[in-house]
Each structure stands twice: as C-alpha cells, then as structure tokens.
Amino acid sequence: MSKGFKGFNKGLECRGFKYTLGKLFKQKNKPDLCKNGFHYCESPLHVFNYYPPKIGTEYAEVEASGKVEKGEDKSCSNELVVKARISISKLFKVHFDLI
C-alpha cells in the first residue's frame, strides 16, 4: 500500500472522473503514467504541479494499492481510495514533517 496526495477540481472531480471519499476505485488495466490509472503524488507539494492552488481546487490524502507505477513526481495505481480532504496548510505541514 502506498500513501499519497491528490488534487481535484471542485467536488473531487479529476479529468471527468468523480471520486467519493472512502470508496475503493479499481481499474482492470495496468497503470501507465500519464496514460492509464489513478494518479497521485507521494510528496505533498508535488500536487501543486498538477493542481495549483486556486478557487475550487481541492486536495485529499489517498491510499493506493494493487499495481503501482512510480514516476519522478507522481505515481499511478489501478486501485485508489480517497481517504480524507486536506487543506493547503496541512499539505505544507505534512511536507515539513516529512523533511
């Protein structure tokens, strides 16, 4: 299991896909960075590379399971649970706690 962080448009929507807190989302296909899978960042502040802070942007803590492919600043999996919404200030706190 891999923990991480994900950015969303308002309503936990990402690229036309609507997420729900606490629900396990699965795909049968193998994860492939930038092409297929549920993407997230292991480093809290890397989410800003994809979802910069602006009105309507939301962030959450996630847990990935199943098959995971890791990249330079993001990872993707074929199984993902959105655990809890997280504030920008909490993203920074978690980042500084990690370093």
Image (cartoon, helix red, strand yellow):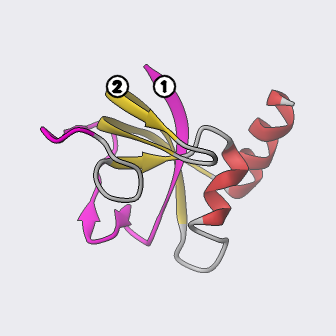
The residue located at (57%, 68%) in the rendering is: 51
In this rendering, the answer to whether 35 lies above or below 96 is below
Q: Nearer the viewer, residue 90 or 49?
A: 49
Q: Residue at the bottom extreme? A: 55
Q: Give, as a three-letter code, the residue at label 2.
A: Ser
Q: Nearer the viewer, residue 65 or 56?
A: 65
Q: Which residues are magenta?
A: 1-30
> Real-space Cα distance between discs 1 and 2?
6 Å
Are dots 1 and 2 in contact, CB under 8 Å? yes
User: SS of the residue at dot 1?
Assistant: strand
The residue located at (30%, 48%) in the rendering is: 37
Q: Give, as a three-letter code, the residue at label 1.
A: Ser
- Is 44 displayed left or right of 40 in the figure? right
Q: Position of residue 35 (x, y in %)?
A: 32, 58
| Screen quadrant of the N terminus | top left
> Is 7 covered by the magenta stretch?
yes
Residue 64 badge: none
In this rendering, the answer to whether 13 lies above or below 68 is below
Q: Position of residue 49 (x, y in %)?
A: 65, 64
Q: Position of residue 17 (x, y in %)?
A: 25, 63
Q: Which residue is mark 2?
A: 65
